[in-house]
Structure formats: C-alpha cells, structure tokens
Image (cartoon, coloured by chain):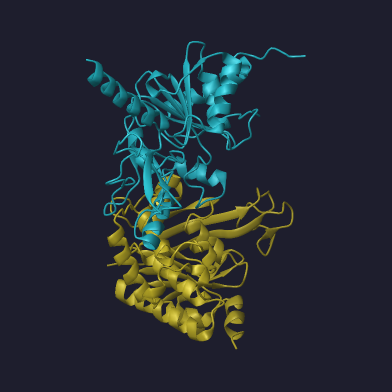
Amino acid sequence: MYETPILQVKNLQKQYGPGCCHCNDLENSMLEKNFCKACGTVYAVRNLSLELYPGEILGVVGESGSGKSTMMQCLYFDTDITSGAAYINRPGKELENVFDLSSQQKRFIRNHDYGMVYQNPVHGLKMNFSSIGNIAEKLIAAGNRNVADMEETAKRLLTNVHIPLHRMKEEPENFSGGMQQRVQIAKALSNNPPILFLDEVTTGLDLSVQAKVLDLIKKIQRELQISMIVVSHDLAVIRMLADRTIVMLNGEIIEEGLTDQVLEDPQHAYTQQLVYSLL
Amino acid sequence: MKAKTHFAFFDEGSKKEIRRATLKAVAIPGYQVPFASREMPIARGWGTGGLQLTLSLIGKTDVLKVIDQGSDESVNAVSIKKLVQDTTGVQLTERTEEADIIQSRHRIPESELTKNQILVLQVPLPEPLRPIEAREYKTKRMHAEDDYSGAWLLLFEQIMKYGKTATTADHPVSVKDRYVMAPSPIPRFDNPKMDHSEALILLGAGREKKIYAVPPYTSVKSLAFDDYPFTVESFEGAHCHLCGTADVFMDELIDHDTGTTIYQCNDTAHCMDQLNKQEEVEVESIYV
C-alpha cells in the first residue's frame, strides 16, 4: 500500500515576463540558464512537481538563483504563480487546487495548515510587537479569542524553543538573530500545522546556534510528526535533516532521491560539482 | 468687494459629491468611503471632515449643535457654529434635544439621541488597522478580506503589557459583524451608545478624506477577548460637583492648592440641563 502525500505539487511554473516563441516551448527552448535572451523573460520555477509525505522532511538544495525561495513563496501564497497546481490532503478537499482558491481561503490555509520560517526573521515577525504577541497573532488569525489560552500556548512554545519566559514580552528586535529565528519557529508551530516550510533557517547563524536550531527542528519532526520542506544551500544541513532531497538548477528539478543517495552518488553533473565543492 | 457665498458655503456640486459618499457609507455600515475632502476655512485636523458633512446635510429649518469634547463653548465649537450660521442662517442651540444635527468632537452626548437627529463625529484617524499596517492598499485589502487579526493583536499586546485593554479612546468596534471601525476618539464610555443608536451616526475624516457611518439600529460591538470583557471607564462613587449627577462621563479636576479631586460633567449641556431641572423643582416647591 502506498502512502498518500500530504502535499502534492504539479507542474508549478513561475515566470517573470510574458514569454515568447523562443522560450514558450519547454522542451527545446533557447534559454540562457533561466533567462530568455529574446524577450527578457525569467523562468524562476519551471515545470516543478513534487510530493511531500506525512512526517517526512524534504530537502531542497541548489545554488543562489535556482528558484528555491521562489518555489517556497509560491507554495506559501506569498507570490502569485504563473501556472500549476497543488493539492493538500485535507479531509474532503483533497482534489482542490489550492492555487485556484480565493485569497480568503488561501489565508485560511496559511493560518491552519501551513507554517513558514523565513530566512530573514523580519519577514516572518512583527519586530516591534512582543514575542508572545507575535505567536498570538497566528492564533488570533485562526480564530482564537481567549487570552489565557493563547498565553499558555505561546509560553509552551517559547519554552520548547528555549526562549526564557522572562523575555517573552520583549520585542524580537531586541533579540539576537538566533533567538529571533527560534521565535519565528515557535510562531510557525503555534497552530500545529501539518506542513512547515523552512527557508534557509540556519543561514547567517553561528555554528552553536545553528546546531540548536537544527536540533529543535529534528525534535519537532520526531515528536509532532510535522512534514517539512527545508530549503538550504548548506549540504551539511540537508544531510542532517532531510529524508529525501531534490536538487534544483535554473528553476528545474534536476535530481531527486534519498538524501544519502543524492549526496553519496550524485548523477547529474551539477549535483556532482555541488557535492564535491563541499570543503 | 464682498461676494455673496453659496448657501452652506459649498457649491451644489460639492454638496452632491459629499452626499453621495454619505449615502454609500450608510449603505455599507462601517466601511470607509473615500471622498474629495475640500479645502475649508479651518485647518485640516480641526474638524473639516465633520464640518463638510454638516454643511452638506444642513437645511434652512435645521437646528445645529456643535460640541468639542463635551463643551458647547470651546473655541473650536464656537468657530464652527459661527461659520455654519454665517453661511446658512440656521438656528443654533446648546440643548441636545432641540438639535437636528449635532456635530461633535470626541464625545457622544449624554442624553439619548432620537431617530430625528443626526450625529456627526469628527475623525482624526479613521483606519483602525493603521498602527499595524502603514500602507493603505494593504489595509483596504485586509478590510475586504475580513482580516482583522491586526486589530485584535493590538488589544492583545495591551493586555500583555498592562494587564488590561488600555485604549483610553477610539476603542475599535465591529459594525454589523463585518467592518471593524474606529469610532473616533470617543471614550470607551460612549462606545455602547453607538450600539443600536436611534440616531444616524456619520463620521468624517477631512485630512484622511474618508466618510463612514453607523445607520440607525445597527449593532456596534466593541472588540474584546472572551476572558477580558469590554469595560467602560468607571466613575464609581464620583458625582458632578455642580449638578450632582452620577453615571455620566466626568472630568477629573485637581485643585493644586488643596490637592483635592473634584468631578464635573464632561457634557456641559447635560450639566446645565440637570441644574435647570433642579431649579425648576426648587422654585415650584417654594411658590406652590
């Protein structure tokens, strides 16, 4: 028996520009990397399909500009897509293409089914609101109107991510980068979302903090069985976290498989180069 | 040369435009309708929104009352009254019951308004979501999508910081369970008066170029969390040192020499009314 994926993405396409006869045909288009010289269109994400299974961590690696973050933004509805479909395994709504939904329904999914941790905490947090308020924001958005209840949830989450409770009423702008990132993770987890997106969460953190954040993510996955898509250009992070990995280049998936397999025995020339570039 | 001004200062086209915005505002309770706020002979931020509404509404037989923070005699209220009277010749009053149109800054009169009256409130900041989102196109979208988590978050932050909702004025309300609205900087004490008010309530923000409304008999709920219910300012044990009334909104006056605190009705017309009634009773008791 096969497992049903919790998130299924089909032929996701995101382009900046109208496209022309030189680049419209995906099979034999004359692109330079992901850029069409004739009309100036940038193909940020090209014909991307993937599946995310319950409880697994899917790693996404690739160089800068390969479309990793754009893909995340598309899935989290931060930016509109050009074409494609995504299906979330929700009771009674399995066949609903979530990209076709109204913005209210998309917001509902963001508040109930998704959690997002951005590379830069500025995007995920309100820096001048208290940490506990930031976590409550997501709970309020999901319809909670009970202060004591939200306070309790927020306290539990902050304890989980090792933020001392005497600082919970402080604004994240007073925190170090690692603490901000952990507040962001707590916020993303506040509604027990089945799907969590992590976009370069450890980039820019020093090694000991990095280790703490990674530990935390691993613990969350083990204890809460949350499915995650982890974007990183750091192969060590991917090796530690991800069960399966996809490799992106110029907006396309060029290789996918079990993480060990991809990292130990890369098939595509670019993946080989990437793996052997590791110091 | 003294040119003869139009009735009610505005040309007919301007009045029509403001009335049209007003009608739309009444049709969509709590929704902020943009309008072409005009240059007025008073500065923006001094009640131009309210004044434009008043001038577009007023007819020759109407009676006008203007109050400024409960007072009929403050400079701003007097100046607005003078301007309207000079350009229309309407009758002015200080008694709430006698007025057809009541323009007010930051208070709703103590005595209950009737269905024959219109309350015009001056609004400095019409957007309840502005503290969390500076961009207008974003707040518009949030209103359209019924996304008010920001307004709730502001209250949550206050509870976290001060242990209670600390809005002293302009506590956000939900109108007809749809639009969240800034009720203008009235004290929380006045919020319940908006709920199912018999009088039409119009709110005008001149600088921000917005008109919005609470039609008569419309539900107006102050935002409050389940376990932190909405409360109004408490004046328990206090009564007006002039007329003796309790259960009204009161100013707290501190005598710096003696250090004692006295309370006085904030609504001067209401205070006067009470005093007159007491006097009537007194006179009757002597001469009957």
Q: Which chain is cyan?
A: B
The percent position of residue A31, horizontal first and vertical second, equals: 68, 60
Left or right? Give the position of B104 relative to B237.
Answer: right
Task: Classify B49 as above or below A247.
Answer: above
Task: Classify A88 as above or below A155.
Answer: above
Left or right? Give the position of B231 relative to B28.
Answer: left
Q: Quadrant of the C terminus of chain B?
A: top left
The percent position of residue B183, horizontal first and vertical second, equals: 43, 38
In the depicted view, which residue is nearer to us: B158 or A219? B158
- Residue A225 location, quadrant: bottom left
Q: Is residue B8 visible?
A: no
Number of callouts in the render? Answer: 0
Tint of chain A: yellow
Q: Quadrant of the N terminus of chain B?
A: top right
Which residue is at a point 69% across and 52% down the rendered structure image?
A22
In the depicted view, which residue is nearer to us: A157 or B157? B157
The percent position of residue A151, horizontal first and vertical second, equals: 32, 64
- Residue A35 location, quadrant: bottom right
Which residue is at a point 40% across and 57% down the rendered structure image?
B158
Which residue is at a point 33% across and 70% down the rendered structure image?
A155
**Residue lying farthest to the right in this orientation:** B1
**Residue lying farthest to the front in this orientation:** B286
Q: Is residue A64 visible?
A: yes
Task: Classify A273 as above or below A193.
Answer: below
Which residue is at a point 42% across and 48% down the rendered structure image?
B168
